[in-house]
Amino acid sequence: MKNEYLEQTKKFYEIYNKEGYPVIKKYEPLQKKLFLKVIFYYSIFGVITLALLVFAIIQSKQTANPMYLYIIALCCYGLFNFVQKLVYKENWKYNNTLKSECMSKFLQIFGNISWDNAGKETNVFGSGLSPEIFKFSTSSTSEPFTDMEIFSYGLFPAYIRRRDDDFFSGTYKDVPFKIVETTLRGKPDGSKKEKTIFQGVLVLFQTPKKTNSTTVIKQKLHISLKQQIFRKLLLIVYVFLSGLYIIFFNLTLVCILLLFFGIPLAFCGFLMYLNNLKDSKSVKLESTDFNKKFNITSSDQVEARYLLTPSFMERLLKLETAFNADTVNCSFRENSVMFALGTNKNLFELGSLYIKAENPKSIQNFYNEFSSIIKMIEYFKLDEHTGV
């Protein structure tokens, strides 16, 4: 198995050096052109933001009203989101150009695999629907997931909007599989405001043994190291600004911030705690580390323990590392398994506006991401032959 992986890796980089790199090098002028546009967008944003902040500070001192700073901050936040969308569009344009010419070359070493970049957004069914309604709805191997198919695996609440990006389909060692990069948006828990339920990659492939139950593995709510650092920085900024308002203005705005931000955040934390208590009634495995990180629910606990072997748990955690995923969930149903790898970064990219063509970082990330899925398929293929 190890020799096969090394040979596959060698072939991949041979194809990259002979066919992929020349194409990436050919589009270097396009990369520079789009990168300059990105610099221009950020420069305009910086100038406008600086002008607005100076105006807000002057007005606040003249009128002794700190609300100018608050309003300008909201305007800058909205402008920043708009600039981010423009930057994303330029990076997508460059990457899609590379993929159109190179993707088929790179995928050939993995088998009979096709790629499509639909970039489609669709409105789907609303909330409150039962998974049983969609139990037998499936799409063919060459077609993207149907919404009913996604919902039937029990990994997400009902959503109302879905946007797909990269879509891969094919077979590897006679195992049919599908991979799609997608974003699901909806109004969970009766929320009036639409928000992102899931952003990342869905992977579906057949397993050699049919299961009689549905076993769902969901990662427990956690705060990553990056999130902890970000929240600490926010807290420092929050305390610093509050101090300035206390010294130069009054306590009114501080009380408003605590009322509208502090109390709701504390309430959300309490709901997260209750959710973990509710989910704790699940299948318990021998691995205490895995139990701490994941909630496992199944209608058949014996079958769940049979499926979740130490080898499977190890590979599941490797998927998390390869994709730098915030969450890794999966569901066994009938003769297939679906993985949901949650991450807000763009995946399966062959290049970047911020990385020179000579730097192989992007192509290395692509290979690590795709080969980690292939290794999971190989695990189940091994399981078919050995019965372990």
Image (spheres, grey):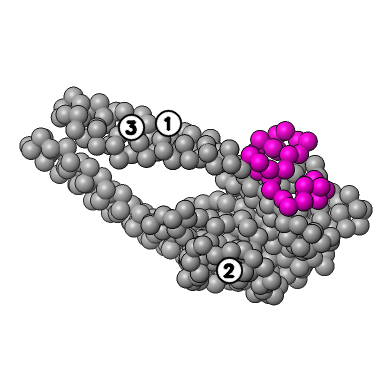
Instruction: From the viewer's side, name the closer residue of 219 and 276.
Output: 276
Q: Residue placed farthest to the right in the image?
A: 386
Q: Residues within 10 Å of mark 1 (few under 14, many from 20)?
A: few
Q: Are marks 3 and 2 in contact (CB under 8 Å)?
A: no
Q: Nearer the viewer, mark 2 or mark 1?
A: 2
What residue appears at the point 54 percent right and 42 percent down from the top-left corner?
275
Position of residue 238 relative to residue 170, above or below, is above
Chain-order first, disc 3 or disc 2: 2
Q: Secondary structure at mark 2?
A: helix
Which residue matches tag 1? 232
The amino acid beneath tag 1 is Lys
Q: Quadrant of residue 88?
A: bottom left
Q: Nearer the viewer, mark 3 or mark 2?
A: 2
- Gap between marks 2 and 1 measured at Cα: 38 Å
Q: Quadrant of residue 58?
A: top left
What residue appears at the point 47 percent right and 55 percent down from the top-left corner?
188
Q: Residue placed farthest to the left in the image?
A: 62
The amino acid beneath tag 3 is Val
Residue 309 seen from this side: yes
- Gap between marks 3 and 1 measured at Cα: 9 Å
In the displayed structure image, the side of residue 91 where residue 147 appears, left or right: right
Q: Secondary structure at mark 3?
A: helix
Q: Position of residue 263 (x, y in %)?
A: 35, 36
Question: Which circle marks residue 51 in the picture?
Answer: none
Chain-order first, disc 2 or disc 1: 2
Q: Position of residue 233 (x, y in %)?
A: 40, 32
Question: Which circle marks residue 147 in the picture?
Answer: 2
> In this picture, which residue range is highlighted in magenta?
280-308
Question: Which circle marks residue 237 in the picture?
Answer: 3
Residue 322 seen from this side: no
Position of residue 89 relative to residue 120, above or below, is above
